[in-house]
Amino acid sequence: MRSDPSGLRLIDRVDSFAERTALLAPEGVFTYDDLIRASANAATGLLAGRDDLAGARVCYLVPPGWEYTAVQWGVWRAGGFGVPLATSHPEAELAWVLDDAEPEAVIAHPSLAGRLRGLTAERKIPLLLTPVLLRDGPVAHFPTLPESREALMLYTSGTTGRPKGVVLTHANLRAQVEALSEAWGWSQDEHILLHLPLHHVHGIVNVLTSALWHGATCEILPRFRAVDVWERLARCEITLYMAVPTVYRRLIDAWDAADPDTRDAWSEGARACRLMVSGSAALPVPTLERWEKITGHRLLERYGMTEIGMGLSNPLDGERRPGFVGAPLPGVEARLVDEDEMVVEAGRPGSIQIRGPAVFREYWRRPEETDAAFTVGGWFRTGDQAVIEDGSWRILGRSSVDILKTGGEKISALEIEDTLRSHPAVADCAVVGVPDVDWGDRVCAAVVLRPGEVVSGEALRSFAKSRLAPYKVPKDVLLLEDLPRNAMGKVTKPAIRELFSPENHE
Ligand code: MCA
Ligand code: AMP
């Protein structure tokens, strides 16, 4: 099926590989032709007789798979600005995004629509169900779009308040995909496995969109289960695999728990893979070493951020140094600066700043935060520290103690504190990330109750769970008489972190 040119390279490229398999999804097997047809149906439904959605936001809550992909492409082909909603989020988080993004429509898979019915009705936003939207019918003509058109709004946690929308244009996505294509040697023959959530750059850009850009095959699992991943690897078909360090750790645990024959089959399958990549959080060197022993693969670690896509990467060919993230990707300018924003001398630590066509346009409707995030020369201030040693970059961590990374999810300690403080029995609290072999940062909360109040840590966790994404819910809650403070009366987070260290729990 040929389609009118959309102006978007990602979609227009399809004509040259229309018959190839695009997706092995939970719903079935689909070619690029199928994707063009289904996304045309979605785009026609969204346009409802108009010529162009002209950047109107469209939110979608669809499980990872065929329908998700068809909807995302449908939004783009209609000229819409896609806002993927997280399938793990409770209503309160979804409500925040709806109020911030102000979409003209929300699309839902029937299995998830229940979470959105009340929210969309209250806000008078049409709720469209995927079986109706994707139904075959006569299709409209679609607009020819400039690549400066907004493509994706991805929500990310900052040091202040609730998550903010990162605006990525089609040109940004294209620059991100092209950089990875060149650096990681993507081709049409790739078969990549996908189980990452599809509301982040990692899953959407590095895996799904990169595969579709190349005419490759993306195999989507409905969720991450270590045994399922190993079994897929064991079939020796997967050529590319990308995940976060927590996932590699879980895969190692599953391998350790398997019997010797199974282990051999799993290791052999993994060895057949061309490339395995880790990112979104620091890869512990013991995980890298163990993985190499089990599979023969030295993981390629790279560094990225929602606002920039991928910035730094170890080489495809050449030395991948454990604990290092390599060098700037093609098209990425990167530098390290001191507190005065002067470029630091070689070998000295500094703050990472990034510039280039992959860098986001703005934080949605937050001009002041956008201005604060960029220097006069257009460099984006990542908030991460690094040092360059023998030409390779080593990430030293974030400048703020209040930004945590748990299982590859970035979260704000302050947002969780605000939520806990909204509990009537809570007088004060502090949330910290405690170093943890599984999660990277383990989210822990120290809580002081109001005089006379009695509430258990578990009850506070349930309270948080009803309001926050599951990965933001503190794993441990410690009830204290008072929070540790310094001489100025300021809460000392390192002292709070100490309270959760294993020695203090014996
Ligand atoms: C689930 N839980 C978590 C997390 N995920 N807790 C802390 N951190 C998490 N990340 C909770 C569950 O709600 C549950 O809570 C308990 O932990 C165990 O759940 P389980 O089913 O075992 O977890 P899971 O569903 O298997 O998820 C773990 C996961 C997942 C597979 C590691 O979190 C994941 O896919 N993370 C990747 C996220 C990602 O793609 N990040 C990229 C963003 P309870 O027992 O209380 O119910 S960064 C990015 O995009 C930039 C650009 C980059 O550089 O890549
Ligand atoms: P996010 O905002 O969710 O896109 O997360 C981006 C953040 O994840 C970065 O600012 C880093 O703090 C962290 N990050 C990503 N990749 C790595 C890595 N390879 N090593 C250490 N931190 C990383």
Image: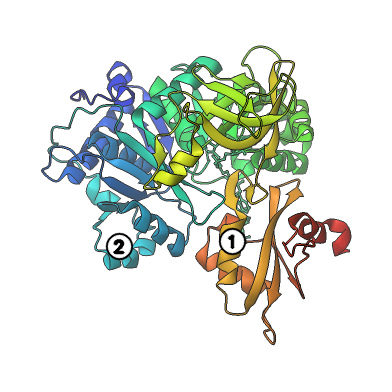
Residue 438 pos. (x, y %): 72, 47
Q: Is residue 347 left or right of residue 105?
A: right
Residues 113 and 468: in front is 468
- Residue 222 place in picture, x, y as percent: 49, 45
| Mark 2 → mark 1, Cα distance in angstroms | 25 Å
Instruction: In the rendered view, tell whether residue 264 sits above or below residue 459.
Output: above
* Residue visible at 77% across and 64% down in the picture: 485
Q: Quadrant of residue 238?
A: top right
Q: Nearer the viewer, residue 229 or 487?
A: 487
Which one is in front, 492 or 305? 492
Q: Report the amino acid beneath label 1.
A: Ile
Question: For this rendering, which residue is in front, 145 or 215?
Answer: 145
Q: Is residue 130 above or below residue 252?
A: below
Give the position of the N terminus as an image quadrant: top left
Residue 238, numbered label: none
User: On the rendered structure, is 161 left or right of 363?
Assistant: right
Mark 1: secondary structure: helix
Disc with the residue nearer the chain's start (2 vs 1): 2
Can you tell which mark lies on residue 416? 1
Task: Give how far across and how far down residue 74 sits, in percent.
Answer: 27, 38
> Ligand 1 near label 2 (Cβ, under 8 Å)?
no
Query: Is any atom of residue 439 visible in this view?
Result: no
Q: Is residue 307 left or right of residue 79?
A: right
Element carrying mark 2: helix
Which residue does the image show at 46% across and 28% down from the upper left? 378
Name the kind of residue labelled 2 in the image.
Thr
Ligand 1 neighbours mark 1 (CB distance < 8 Å): no
Q: How dense is the environment of label 1, judged by Cα within 10 Å: few (below 14), some, or many (20 and up)?
A: many
Q: Which residue is mark 2?
A: 120
Q: How far across and how far down the image is residue 105, in percent?
A: 26, 52
Mark 2 neighbour density, 10 Å: few (under 14) some (14–19) many (20 or more): some
Quarter of the rendering containing residue 20: top left
